[in-house]
Image: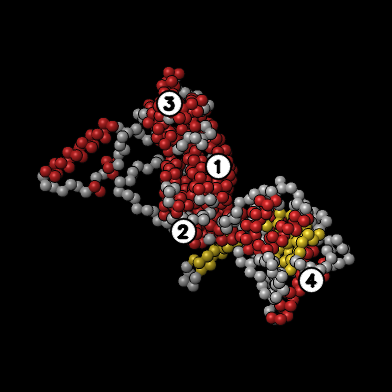
Amino acid sequence: MIAAIKPAGFNTRGLLAYLYGPGRHDEHLDPHIVAGFAMLGMPDPGRNPDDTLTQLAHHLDEPVHLRNSEFGKKITDHVWHCPVRAAPEDRHLSDTEWADIAQRIVEAAGIAPPGDDLGCRWIAVRHADDHIHILATTVREDGRRPKLHGSGIRVGDACRQIETDYGLRQLKKGDRTAGKRPTQAEMHKAQRLGWDQTSDDWLQDRIRAAIHHAGNAEELLAYLEADGVAIKPRRAPSGDLLGYAAGRPGDLNKDGKQIFHAGGTIAPDLTLPKLRARLETTAPEEHPTARRQRPTTPWHQATDALDILNSDMADDTHAQAHITALGELIEATAQKAPGHSRAELRTAARTFARAQRPQIRAENQAAHTLRRAARDIAHTATGPDGSAFAALLAALVWATIVAARWHEAQNHAHQAEAARQTLHHLHTAADHALAPVIDNLAARQPSDQARRTLAYDVRAAVPVHADRILTDPAWPALATVLADAEAGGHKPHQLLKEAAAQRELTSGRQPARVLITRIQHTSRNPAPNPRAEAARRTTTMRLSATALSAGVAEPARSAVPAEQKHRPRL
């Protein structure tokens, strides 16, 4: 059940005319009052045509008129309007049930607190099977204004309890991270102008798509302007940027002027301070012993960066930062993806936006590597090869599973649901990207004898999942990947153990497919050379011993070439 409190209005008579009228898009059948304040005391215009709506409007507005005449300052925001709608699959409620629901909602909102005889005047009008409209005038009988701050949260909590009591569809409790729902006027305007999206949704997509093209807030606004978005910055006398509003070309008011929307009204996480926190983080200082070898392409770099997300979820502030950056990476991947995957990935990015909105403060510095990977993809001039793209999508699937689990553990119901919905679109894109890779690999599978040997490696490395892997239709393709890796000097048994350790296989629908992308990504680097590594260690020890015996200080570690310090070890 959804109760959508509308912005305060001023025309009680006009709203009544709509509620008792024929309807603009939904037909209004048998409009009538199902509940109202205790002193309503007049017939229902819907059931008594001789009584006019003007009389009812005057009756509801009477405390407003008295207050205006007493204080002299006219109130112009006194009309409280809240449609309450059941889910399409819910049963049709009776008038008596809707009356109880309306009473509970006005009590929760503070319109008519329980046991308070001096509350606001209100009525609930039903003109369809699945919803009612509650209209109230927000001046109490004693002339005071009601305390409506936080009423949306209280009404939402009341709706969750009503769903339980009446056996209706259970919705998740609100957490103040949802974007603003488009109004009927906005939806009708988009329809009238032939737009697929309302202006807020259109602007949200453009801003999210621009984030990884900019290094700071000023660059972001400049990029948006170049992309055709109308930008209205708010600056201090010094010229410093204090805020911004954005507008969609062609979205004009009745006077023909551009309509602008503040960043925070477009989406809660698109305010200037929150964008700055994401854009203007600096690169963390790299540890001296960190690996210097970098992936050869941004696609490989992004896949490696996702491993950081999977291993850095213990700290909540780091986890939230990584999840926010994960959404940016999905968006960047969608922009540069091959045409057959682009639409699915754009939908995934749009769906994941809710999972990005934090309830926990994000330590954005922690996600610098992941965010840098998104920016590198956004700026790359070349698309990925098939295997690199499939590996990245598989890594995005697993990272989204990790994000969903973290949100579930934190009781972030809406964010967890958004991540689960995103998985559907990522799975579809990943399956589509991996299909030609698997076909190519299966066409050159190794001999029967080689496959039997590799099957032994599978049973030794991942015994718990071996039967599922070997019966997976993608097993011949995985056998080819393992044979190719072995020809390059890698040990199939070791690669399988490492791949299984990087992602648990229980949740994988087809474990062989999961291993294909992971092992292809890992085995692209040259295999470590045990003899060369042993020789390097022996030489280093001999030089150190010689220097010490001669009374010469050992060279500083920073003077040792990086390629020697960080050569992979067995």
- Lower sequence index among marks 3 and 1: 1
Q: Secondary structure at mark 4?
A: helix
Could you say which quadrant of the image residue 175 lies in? bottom right
User: Label 3 vs label 1: CA separation?
Assistant: 29 Å
- Lower sequence index among marks 3 and 4: 4
Of marks 2 and 1, the one in the foreground? 1
Q: Amino acid at mark 1?
A: Leu
Q: Amino acid at mark 2?
A: Ala
User: Label 3 vs label 4: CA separation?
Assistant: 81 Å
The answer to whether residue 148 is above or below residue 551 is below
The residue pinned by badge 3 equals 459
Callout 4: few (<14), some (14-19), or many (20+) C-alpha neighbours within 10 Å? some
Q: Position of residue 6 (x, y in %)?
A: 68, 62
Q: Residue furthest front?
A: 115
Checking the image for residue 423, the label placed there is 1
Q: Residue at x 49, y 35 (%)?
A: 506
The residue pinned by badge 2 equals 277
Checking the image for residue 229, the label placed there is none
Q: Is residue 450 left or right of residue 113?
A: left
Q: Is residue 394 left or right of residue 80?
A: left
Of marks 4 and 1, the one in the foreground? 4
Q: Residue at x 56, y 53 (%)?
A: 206
Q: Secondary structure at mark 1?
A: helix
Of marks 2 and 4, the one in the foreground? 4
Q: Nearer the viewer, residue 66 or 372?
A: 66
Q: Amino acid at mark 4?
A: His
Q: Secondary structure at mark 3?
A: helix
Task: State the quadrant of the C terminus.
Answer: top left
User: Label 2 vs label 3: CA separation?
Assistant: 48 Å
Dots 4, 1 in contact, CB < 8 A: no
- Lower sequence index among marks 2 and 4: 4
